[in-house]
């Protein structure tokens, strides 16, 4: 069995080597000729999987995408061909949620203010939006949800309209898939008019798809509104962001919000499980086996965890400032955007960091402090 896999998908060899011969490819430049004799195709969001790519791949029986979104996959065409498709919904949700939380802590630190007391609006309450809300609520923040599709499905959570969310929120975090048609289309959901309507001193963070925000309109708005603070992990026209936009945003990263080692491993492992099920063979690999032991632990001997101390802990698992600096230096070089993603292998999730407390210390962390760290996902 021949397996064609994106070279930037981790742990493929560890999981799939026993199932067949693996050939690694550049997912962004993958051609139809390269998949002609493939039995299995493993991709990420940079590969458009459609008839043009697969029309001569007559042996192909399984396509897996280590992503939450499926807008890069022609699912109807795969169905017509009888090719099984699997993606990995939720695989990087925790990573995205923690990215949002860390980024907001970093921005608060830079602006010499506190994240405490802010009202955060989550637009899109699927896997990643829910994970972001979990972190923010664990820290005691009020979270507002807007998701008309979830609301129509009968989701029991409380939802409000986008207009109401923009009136009430101090921070807006975007977590929607990209859709170009329908009453709730998200392409340019934040167009020039919507951006102009944002209230003073609002923070806007986008970790879903670049085209949810009209980037040219954002450039225009940011040139006159220094009060609007923006964090972008995704960009219109990836892998070629608009160069004039980058200096205008507070933190800039190359679509890596979900790029924790745990999230990457989880995504590939889900595809491995699905292929094993499709082939009717036993799953004999373990997700825990893939992850290395984390090099740090944290001894906490303070009664109250202030925001500065919490941010220092967060930086042990992911220091956003490093990625921001690298992005600004290399994003406009040849293949710079993709190279930054390919080389992004160091980030862990909160669960990797074990927090330990003195057993009989009068200054040991309070119950509230311990509960907060546990709710955020740190190991105890």
Image: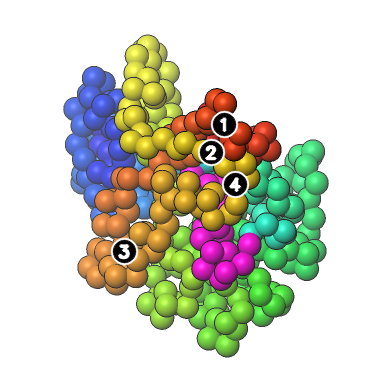
Q: Nearer the viewer, residue 209 or 229?
A: 229
> Helix, strand or loop at disc 1?
loop
Which of pointers 3 and 1 indicates the residue nearer the eye? 1
Return the x and y of residue 200 as percentages of the image width and height. Answer: 69, 77
The reply, left or right, for residue 9 in relation to residue 303 is: left
Q: Nearer the viewer, residue 185 or 198?
A: 198
Return the x and y of residue 315 as percentages of the image width and height. Answer: 43, 50
Is residue 101 found inside the magenta-colored segment of the image? yes
The reply, left or right, for residue 226 in relation to residue 267 is: right
- Distance Cα–Cα, label 2 vs label 1: 8 Å
> Helix, strand or loop at disc 2?
loop
Q: Nearer the viewer, residue 270 or 323?
A: 323
Q: Residue at position x 34%, y 14% from top?
A: 284
- Distance Cα–Cα, label 2 vs label 4: 9 Å
Q: Quadrant of residue 191?
A: bottom right
Which of pointers 2 and 1 indicates the residue nearer the eye? 1
- Distance Cα–Cα, label 2 vs label 3: 34 Å
Precedes in sequence: disc 4 or disc 1: 4
Precedes in sequence: disc 2 or disc 3: 2
Residue 361 got which mark?
Answer: 1
Residue on which the image places disc 4: 305
The reply, left or right, for residue 30 in relation to residue 126 is: left
Is residue 196 found inside the magenta-colored segment of the image? no
Residue on which the image places disc 2: 301
Q: Is residue 53 above or below residue 363?
A: below
Q: Main secondary structure of the magenta part?
A: helix
Q: Residue at position x 66%, y 43% from top?
A: 138
Residue on which the image places disc 3: 326
Precedes in sequence: disc 3 or disc 4: 4
Tag 2 near tag 1, CB within 8 Å: yes
Residues rendered magenta in the picture: 95-114
């Amino acid at each position: 069995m021949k397996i064609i896999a994106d070279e930037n998908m981790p742990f493929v060899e560890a999981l799939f080597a026993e199932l067949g011969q693996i050939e690694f490819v550049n997912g962004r430049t993958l051609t139809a000729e390269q998949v002609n004799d493939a039995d299995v195709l493993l991709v990420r969001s940079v590969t458009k999987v459609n008839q043009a790519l697969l029309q001569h791949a007559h042996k192909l029986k399984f396509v897996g995408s280590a992503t939450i979104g499926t807008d890069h996959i022609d699912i109807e065409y795969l169905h017509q061909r009888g090719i099984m498709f699997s993606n990995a919904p939720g695989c990087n949700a925790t990573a995205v949620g923690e990215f949002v939380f860390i980024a907001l802590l970093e921005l608060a630190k830079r602006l010499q203010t506190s994240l405490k007391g802010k009202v955060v609006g989550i637009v899109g309450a699927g896997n990643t939006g829910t994970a972001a809300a979990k972190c923010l609520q664990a820290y005691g923040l009020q979270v507002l949800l807007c998701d008309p599709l979830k609301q129509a499905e009968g989701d029991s959570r409380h939802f409000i309209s986008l207009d109401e969310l923009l009136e009430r929120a101090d921070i807006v975090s975007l977590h929607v898939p990209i859709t170009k048609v329908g009453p709730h289309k998200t392409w340019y959901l934040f167009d020039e008019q919507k951006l102009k309507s944002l209230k003073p001193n609002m923070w806007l963070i986008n970790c879903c798809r670049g085209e949810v925000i009209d980037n040219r309109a954002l450039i225009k708005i940011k040139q006159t509104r220094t009060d609007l603070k923006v964090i972008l992990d995704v960009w219109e026209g990836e892998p070629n962001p608009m160069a004039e936009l980058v200096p205008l945003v507070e933190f800039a990263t190359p679509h890596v919000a979900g790029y924790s080692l745990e999230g990457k491993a989880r995504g590939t492992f889900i595809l491995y499980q699905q292929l094993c099920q499709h082939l009717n063979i036993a799953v004999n690999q373990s997700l825990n086996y893939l992850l290395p032991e984390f090099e740090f632990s944290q001894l906490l001997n303070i009664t109250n965890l202030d925001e500065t101390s919490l941010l220092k802990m967060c930086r042990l698992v992911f220091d956003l400032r490093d990625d921001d600096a690298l992005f600004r230096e290399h994003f406009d070089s040849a293949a710079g955007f993709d190279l930054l993603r390919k080389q992004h292998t160091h980030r862990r999730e909160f669960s990797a960091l074990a927090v330990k407390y003195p057993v009989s210390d009068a200054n040991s962390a309070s119950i509230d402090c311990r509960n907060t760290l546990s709710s955020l996902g740190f190991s105890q």
